Image: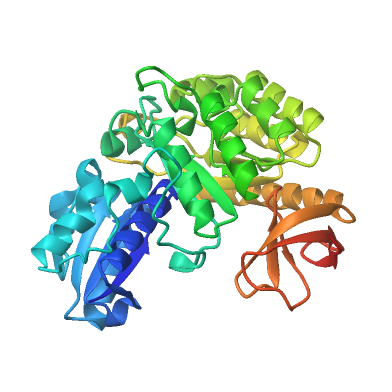
Amino acid sequence: MKYSVITFGCRVNQADSLGFEEELIAAGAEPSAPAAADLVVVNTCSVTATADQGTRQTIRRVARDNPAARIVVTGCYATRCPDEVAVLPNVVRVVSNEVKTTLITSVLRELRVHRPESALTSAERFGDGDGHCGARIEPGLAGRTAFTLRAQTGCAEACTYCIIPTTRGMPKSVPIRGLLAEIERVALAGFKEIALTGVHLGSYGRDLCPAASLEDLLGNASRVAARHDVLIRVSSLEPMDCSPAVVGLVETRDEIAPHFHLPLQHASDRVLATMRRPYTIDYYASLVADIRRRIPHASIGSDVIVGFPGESDVDFEALTAYLEASPLTHVHVFPYSDRPGTAAARMKNKVAGPVIRERAQRARDIGRQLSNRFHDSQVGTDHRALTIDDGTMAVTGNYLKVRIPPGRRRNEWVRVRLTSHHDGELLAG
């Protein structure tokens, strides 16, 4: 059987899709382009209306190009609107996030594809507790050099614009022992970078018994990573969860990448309160200023929403003023759009579409200036970097992607000196 996995959205979806690929390969399936696949798994996002539309367009295109394809749809859009997804062409099954982890096993059973004895077992996927793991993956799976590992899913926050708590449910963490076994397994398979991710990663461990914390996870993960020369990269953290202890671990542990992604969403306290974001702009500004002081070379990315209901000219100017003066290194800008079922969708005083687009463009322009400034500051600095793609590109710990001279393979550690915004020279050692 030939398969294809198409992934939309966040790193959590990317991690889930990597798991799908592992199970399919272990069952003897062969990766393929969607146009030639017998089974196409579409892992959907529903963070915006645009994401929903992208899923529908993709499914229709796959069905048109490959009329024999059996399409299985999962993820947040499939969870939020299963009936809407089920009527799309060639869709044979819609799987909610709640039962996503058993998707491939049940689908293979329905399709009468038998897993051979060599297929992954639960013990192989999570280890037997003694570090003996059945590594059946390798760098390059799904075209990725780094491995994305989901530490938790679900969210209990009540941000007024977000539908994800509805589609992902309450927080649920993977116990530390299981995650450490996965890190060991993935490292033994040859991966040199592992991105820890979650829907609300900063809440990690609060639901476990006994309770744990993100600091506990990172401290243990960094020790395993040190044994295997692996870099741990932490994905998005809510500002209130980026504690001094977490910053301290990033500052002092070479095995943790100096890379933060801290969604701001807005710099007006009034808008933040309407969004139900549990911090102020002063808190956020103090946090990122402290990170920049303690880790001068760290990358610090953020997300902002423009055009939120009730956002005034004064509010928007507060946002742009902060961004321009901030130590942020890159910004993802999201023009606000209603998500049915959220509190924000029911709010009055909506901002006009042309105004939202104009504000988004201005915020993106500022984001490009911040990125250029950070790249300028890094020219002439030396970094350890991991080669990707065909070996002529490398990614540094602080998330700079640079061109390097040919002659290296994918997934090698190299020393690089940045000679321009996007170019580097190789150093010895």
Q: Is residue 285 visible?
A: yes
Counting every numbered tag in the picture gives 0
**Image quarter of residue 90:** bottom left
Q: Which residue lies most toward the right here?
A: 380
**Residue 157 in the image: x percent, y percent?**
39, 25
Locate residue 225 relative to residue 369 in the image: left or right.
left
Asked whether 322 or 180 is in front, the reply is 180
Q: From the image, which quarter does the N terminus lie in?
A: bottom left
| Residue at screen point 44% across, 28% down | 204
Q: Is residue 54 visible?
A: no
**Residue 316 in the image: x percent, y percent?**
60, 34
Asked whether 257 or 224 is in front, the reply is 224
Looking at the image, residue 78 lies above or below residue 21: above
Q: From the image, which quarter does the C terminus lie in?
A: bottom right
Locate residue 400 relative to residue 164 in the image: left or right.
right
Locate residue 223 relative to residue 406 in the image: left or right.
left
**Residue 388 in the image: x percent, y percent?**
62, 66
| Residue at screen point 53% across, 47% down | 195
- Figure colour scheme: rainbow
Q: Which residue lies most toward the top here?
A: 210
**Residue 181 in the image: x percent, y percent?**
44, 42
**Image quarter of residue 18:** bottom left
Locate residue 367 relative to residue 236 in the image: left or right.
right
Asked whether 187 or 193 is in front, the reply is 187
